[in-house]
Image: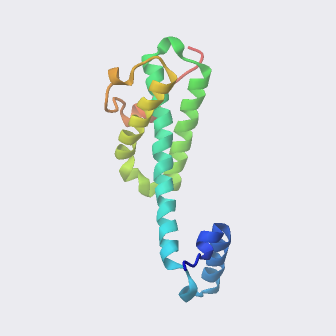
Amino acid sequence: MQTTTLYEQDFYAWTQRQAKLLRAGQLGELDIENLIEEIESLGRQEWQELRNRLGVLLGHLLKWHYQPEARSKSWVYTIREQRQEIQRHLKENSSLKPYLREAIAVGYEKGLNLVGQETPLDPKTLPQSCPFSETDIFEAPIDWPL
């Protein structure tokens, strides 16, 4: 007969119990294996947020560059917001900075998918690796109105 653990039954209650045990210094009662898994998962989430935000930013930069006739105020504000949020995210998680080039490469793939979903452009006709420098990505002027 399989026994279910608090971790499996009620994740929130499990988190609260682990926090209480840590605060009390009752380290021997901690659910170490699941704690390790959850801490690693938190780190992956930070990495995924960086990639996802870069995907949105790079997709909009591609649309901006390859569809100048369709430029909109919405695109400007999406680009600005993603730039700001990525900079905040990197400031709060500075250990991600060495992985920025890799995150840009993965984000660019996501950006190509966004272009394919949201425009008549065929992503296969666009550069298959990111054509933008970090300066282009984070600092190139994007102004509205044109």
Residue placed most toward the observer, 64 or 94: 64
Image quarter of the N terminus: bottom right
Percent position (x, y) of residue 43?
A: 48, 60
Q: Would residue 140 appear left or right of 1 to someone viewing this image?
A: left
Give the answer, above or below, for where 84 lies relative to 132. Answer: below
Q: Residue furthest front?
A: 1
Q: Would residue 112 appear left or right of 1 to someone viewing this image?
A: left
| Residue at screen point 46% across, 37% down | 55
Residue placed most toward the observer, 94 or 82: 82
Give the answer, above or below, for where 27 lies relative to 65. Answer: below
Q: Residue furthest left?
A: 128
Percent position (x, y) of residue 76?
A: 57, 25
Q: Residue furthest top?
A: 69
Percent position (x, y) of residue 106?
A: 38, 41
Percent position (x, y) of residue 67?
A: 46, 16
Q: Which image quadrant for residue 136?
A: top left
Q: How many marks?
A: 0
Image quarter of the C terminus: top right
Colouring scheme, one of rainbow, by chain, secondary structure, one colour = rainbow
| Residue at screen point 48% across, 46% down | 50
Residue placed most toward the observer, 141 or 83: 83
Residue placed most toward the observer, 135 or 3: 3
